[in-house]
Structure formats: C-alpha cells, structure tokens
C-alpha cells in the first residue's frame, strides 16, 4: 500500500484509539461509510435493471427532446385567446381548492396535536387518517372525483382541496405540537374554555407559519391543476393534452408560456406576502 492508501485505510476502516486525561482508552467504532456506499451502488444498479434504464438509449434519444422544444418556438400567439378561459379555470380551481383544504385541516390538526388532546388513541387515529390521505396521488383523487362528480373543474377543485388538506394539515399539527403551552395553561387556569384558550394562546403562535404554508401550497397547486385535465378535471390540462395529441407544439408552447408567466406572478406575490408574515 502507498502512504495515501494507508491514510485512507486509517481514517475509514481501522479503529482509532484515544487516550483520555484519566488514562482510559476509548476505541472509536469503524466507519460504516464503505458499507453504505456499497449498498447504495447495489441498489442503484438493481433499480436500473428493474426499470430498464439505459444510458445509451438516453444518449441516443435525448436529441428528440430538443426537437420538440424547437417546434414550440416561437409560440402561436394567435392561440392565446383560446388559453385565457382554461387558464382562469386553473387559477380558480387552485385558489378555491387551497382555501377549502386549508380551512378543513384546522380542526383535524387540533385533534391530532398531542399537547392539546391527551388521548393517544384519538391522536393516533387522526394522524393515521392524515397519512392515508397523503398517500393518494392528486391525479388519482381527480380521476375518482370525475367518476363521482363528472368531468370539469369541480372534480379538479375537490382533488386540490384534498391534497391541500393533507399537506397543510400535517405541517399544522406538527407546528401546534411545538408551541409554548405556558400561556394556554395560564388561560385555562383562569377559567377560560379549551377552545377559547386555543384561539387566544395557541393559534396566534402558528398563524403566520400556517398562512405561509398555505401560500406555498397554492403556488404548487397552480402547477398541479394544469395537468389535472389529463383525467378530465378541467383547466389547462384539457387543451394541453389535446394539442400534444395533435402534435401542435407551437400552441403547446403558447400554453406553457402562459402558465409560466402566471406561476412567476403568483410566486412573486406569494413570496412578498410570506416575507411580511415572517
């Protein structure tokens, strides 16, 4: 072994001994880094084999992606009047769905908080309920909603509301569990009811972070709502799916450009509001 290789062996594999001031020796455990790297490499190779991933195929076919992008430029500006209505539907779906989901998650998050509800069975049940709802993909929820409520923006709004409910609710009850309970206990000791104590002692502590989370979720919902049309849930996804199917990439470019500008504007407004809240 060379000197550098010996140094690497000493640092990673060979246990090191330290002598404490009182004369005792402490042996440092061997690093598990080589084992972790070996498992990571093996898992990566196995994943590539199972999914059929091929770097050679990627290298050969990646150029076609840029062919489609070139077909999108310049966008078909004459198609913009057809984009306005689905774009407004997408924004309305996102706004209403985010609002409904954010409001509905508040009582459920309060019940989930272990520092407010001392029954482990109750908190565990509602936390499990949140976990089950979070496992449902938004597209699957939208597809189920189209079967129940029919095609259109209503099904998309329901899907966004369910996603917002699960996402914001989990974060909210985790925030509630970390608040300072001193003021809450003091108000209850003075004879105030539990709901009023939560309103005046707990809620003001989590409100800025909660609104910031809802705004962040709304930003993402605008993007998610744009693809819900693939399952018939309204919005930009309907015309986007149609134009891609007909290979009208210039019109696809116009749709994506309108969506990009909308998302940038919403993110700018949302970031400004979040900075004021925090």
Image (cartoon, rainbow, N blue to C red):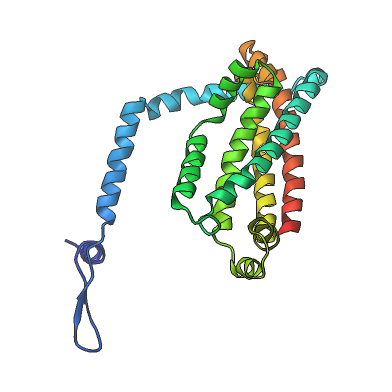
- Name the residue: 76% across, 19% down: 76
The quarter of the picture where residue 44 lies is: top left
- Name the residue: 75% across, 41% down: 266
Q: Would residue 247 be found to the left or right of residue 267 on screen? A: left
Question: Does any portion of residue 260 appear in the rendered image?
Answer: no
Quadrant where the N terminus sits is bottom left
Give residue 177's position: percent from left, percent from top.
Answer: 54, 58
- Name the residue: 64% across, 49% down: 213
Is 271 rendered above or below residue 266? Answer: below
Quadrant where the C terminus sits is bottom right
Is 274 rendered above or below residue 247? Answer: below
The quarter of the picture where residue 183 lies is: bottom right
Q: Would residue 34 be found to the left or right of residue 212 on screen? A: left
- Name the residue: 72% across, 44% down: 267
The quarter of the picture where residue 185 lies is: bottom right
Q: How many marks?
A: 0
Give residue 248's position: percent from left, percent from top.
Answer: 68, 14
Q: Would residue 42 be found to the left or right of residue 222 on screen? A: left
């Amino acid at each position: 072994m060379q000197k550098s290789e010996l140094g690497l062996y000493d640092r990673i594999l060979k246990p090191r001994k330290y002598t404490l001031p009182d004369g005792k020796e402490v042996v440092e455990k061997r690093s598990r880094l080589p084992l972790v790297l070996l498992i990571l490499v093996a898992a990566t190779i196995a994943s590539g084999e199972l999914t059929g991933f091929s770097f050679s195929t990627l290298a050969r076919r990646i150029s076609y992606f840029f062919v489609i992008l070139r077909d999108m430029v310049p966008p078909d500006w004459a198609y913009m009047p057809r984009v306005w209505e689905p774009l407004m539907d997408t924004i309305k779906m996102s706004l209403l769905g985010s609002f409904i989901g954010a409001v509905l998650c508040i009582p459920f998050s309060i019940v989930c908080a272990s520092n407010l509800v001392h029954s482990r069975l109750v908190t565990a049940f509602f936390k499990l309920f949140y976990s089950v709802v979070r496992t449902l993909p938004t597209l699957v929820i939208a597809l189920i909603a189209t079967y129940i409520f029919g095609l259109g923006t209503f099904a998309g709004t329901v899907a966004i509301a369910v996603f917002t409910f699960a996402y914001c609710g989990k974060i909210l009850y985790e925030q509630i569990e970390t608040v300072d309970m001193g003021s809450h206990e003091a108000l209850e000791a003075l004879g105030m009811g539990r709901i009023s104590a939560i309103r005046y002692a707990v809620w003001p502590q989590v409100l800025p972070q909660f609104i910031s989370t809802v705004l962040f979720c709304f930003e993402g919902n605008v993007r998610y709502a744009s693809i819900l049309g693939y399952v018939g849930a309204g919005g930009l996804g309907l015309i986007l799916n149609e134009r891609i199917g007909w290979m009208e990439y210039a019109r696809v470019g116009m749709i994506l450009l309108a969506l990009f500008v909308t998302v940038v504007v919403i993110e700018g407004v949302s970031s400004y509001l979040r900075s004021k809240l925090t």
